[in-house]
Amino acid sequence: MYTVTVRDHFMIAHSFHGEAFGPAQRLHGATYVVDVEFRRSSLDESGMVVDIGRAGEVLRATLGELNYRNLDDEPAFAGRNTSTELLARVVADRLAERVRGGGLGESARGLTGITVTLHESHVAWASYERDL
Amino acid sequence: MYTVTVRDHFMIAHSFHGEAFGPAQRLHGATYVVDVEFRRSSLDESGMVVDIGRAGEVLRATLGELNYRNLDDEPAFAGRNTSTELLARVVADRLAERVRGGGLGESARGLTGITVTLHESHVAWASYERDL
Amino acid sequence: MYTVTVRDHFMIAHSFHGEAFGPAQRLHGATYVVDVEFRRSSLDESGMVVDIGRAGEVLRATLGELNYRNLDDEPAFAGRNTSTELLARVVADRLAERVRGGGLGESARGLTGITVTLHESHVAWASYERDL
Amino acid sequence: MYTVTVRDHFMIAHSFHGEAFGPAQRLHGATYVVDVEFRRSSLDESGMVVDIGRAGEVLRATLGELNYRNLDDEPAFAGRNTSTELLARVVADRLAERVRGGGLGESARGLTGITVTLHESHVAWASYERDL
Amino acid sequence: MYTVTVRDHFMIAHSFHGEAFGPAQRLHGATYVVDVEFRRSSLDESGMVVDIGRAGEVLRATLGELNYRNLDDEPAFAGRNTSTELLARVVADRLAERVRGGGLGESARGLTGITVTLHESHVAWASYERDL
Amino acid sequence: MYTVTVRDHFMIAHSFHGEAFGPAQRLHGATYVVDVEFRRSSLDESGMVVDIGRAGEVLRATLGELNYRNLDDEPAFAGRNTSTELLARVVADRLAERVRGGGLGESARGLTGITVTLHESHVAWASYERDL
């Protein structure tokens, strides 16, 4: 099995609901350093899992929908805690939609899965893994 | 599948038995930077895999049983080489016991597995993966 | 010249004023991974630059005044852009005050300077260096 | 399941064929930081997955066949794009052959698989995973 | 003293002249991960050392003159070894020229110096420091 | 000013004397990841600060005198706390002696200084800087 991973980041504000979150119930924020791993069982005819340059552009576009925003004001997240693990899923699902829509080219239809990891600090990160 | 990972470290002395270990048969030591990955298939009602703050505290308590010790003197390791891979298992098993004992709260009973990785230097690390 | 550096982090929300900031004029946030370097020309009688454990506690207390907050609401920053470089200075100045106040013990009076570095992502960081 | 990973690197020149590669069609080069993960289900009699020292030597020997070379001149790669993902497989297959040949000792016959990851920069890497 | 640092990378082929270089006399290549530190003694009126976004763009443009090239074919380096330390200076000098030319805006004229660091692997890097 | 830095590591056991050290008064150990920065004002005739390969060998030899040892048993450290900052100086002084002795070649006599940094974990490190 082959994988290719690309890295980028985004910066948001948000707050959490629930006593378990303690001071994180206050409005604060985070930088998320994002790693997206693309998987496939054999290489395409160019010898690649995915075009790394194009993957980086699609990732940047996807993160651009979240970057420099207060997630508490985003209708997509109404009534939900935008935990690192939930955001990993959101990014993965939105990337999957772009792949299906041809955003990574025809050859990318051979991809079998992706894993999105969001690093919230040097001591904590979360990921979501799904098929494509 | 979702994961959340937290990082901490501990520092120990030990020695190895067996000619294969060469100079590492002498009493020496190591800093282990520890990553614990918690896995579950769906988020809990707060939108989390596990409470990151609480996970960090439980990890610290678990590592506290090993930190600043000479493992050659610990009855738990008598007659065994405390290799990085063995210690990864020890930390994983002890964490599993704490999770089962409720140390991470009721919601943590939905966790399906953990992987513990111990980094012994910038060029070598080991891990142990198990179900919960 | 000797140095000792300790690392911690904090997470805040804020926004910037000025067209140069583009989308960063919107309310967003950041994780800052913070490195504090302490400098002195000779070691103290225990053979240290500073007590690393105590330095970590003082750093945590200092960052606790900023952590999980919306800096736009903090009187201390009224009318100022809380850029990474400005926040590096704020942390350095507050740490300097604690050192002068004895927060790191008597021996820490031999420290000659500190440098505070705030990493805002994997591709950008800022620092402020000052004497003590 | 246990793993042990060791890290090394190699530096090569190459060029890519195909319009999708844009300016990377020109002769250029890369440093690949290489992580090799060895897997096995139980530890050997010394309490190890694999002898880390010996694993490092075998990895260095394997990378030595590629290091400081122009891959465009290597018969092994004639007519193929030496993408990061392809090179990850080449390193994995060559290591597998050495393991089967006894290069890591008798005990290494208990290894069940390896994953080779090649980091081409701080924002992109690729891997190939296979059984042994 | 304040600093701001931004990171990017470029990938080149080259070879070295002189027996001291051993196998590095053959045509090979490298990925250079580049950190550029900008220094100034006080913040500009926006509260910044330099506009991080603009600094990133100028760095990318500067590295674009070297990226995906065989440095052995570049007239600028004829008869010279393109060691990591020499390339650090080349990048620093070219950036300095752009700053003087207004590429980072009027406010950037308050910058007092830059340091360029090129990482050639996880175990070796070089830098060049100069005034502006 | 130019610099070149190389990285290696060593693993030791030791204990500290003084109540301030708390549990670190017990016999424990550490992995030190070591960065050595060499400085000079102009490049040598080969276009280098120092021969990176040779620098790595000299560093390895220097660390070999400490590696896999219990520092409490080393006469060189009798009656002293082998703090990270002290060990940074020990490594720097021993390297300086080797440079003066010609261990890095004639050209290395143009070096003006070195800085040795020892990372004891992902959250703490220390350094010692000196002239050559």
Image (spheres, coloured by chain):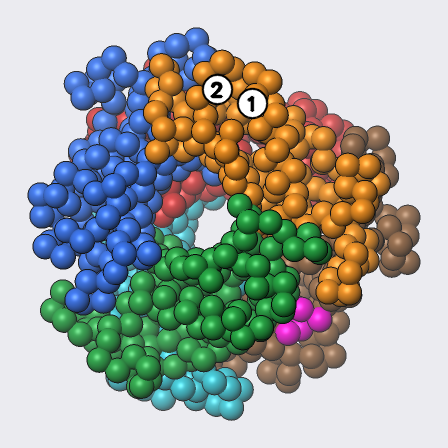
Chain colours: A orange, B green, C brown, D blue, E red, F cyan
Residue sticking out furthest to the top: D19
Q: Is residue B54 left or right of residue F73?
A: right
> Residue at the location (69% across, 58% down)?
C10
Tell me, yes or no, whether the two marked residues, 1 and 2, touch with CB atoms within 8 Å: yes
Q: Nearer the viewer, residue B108 or C66?
A: B108
> Residue at the location (44% across, 77% down)?
B67
Residue A71 position within the rendered picture, expressed as x and y whole percent measured from the top left: 78, 42
Q: Is residue F17 above or below residue B93?
A: below
The answer to if E62 sits in the magenta stretch is: no
Give, as a three-letter code, the residue at label 2: Arg
Q: Which residues are drawn in magenta?
A: C57-61
Residue A26 visible somewhere in the drawing: yes
Q: Is residue E68 left or right of residue F97?
A: right
The picture quadrant where one finds residue B45 is bottom right
Give, as a three-letter code, the residue at label 1: Val
The answer to if C60 sits in the magenta stretch is: yes
Residue position for label 2 = A109
Q: Is residue D127 left or right of residue E98?
A: left
| Residue A99 circle label | 1
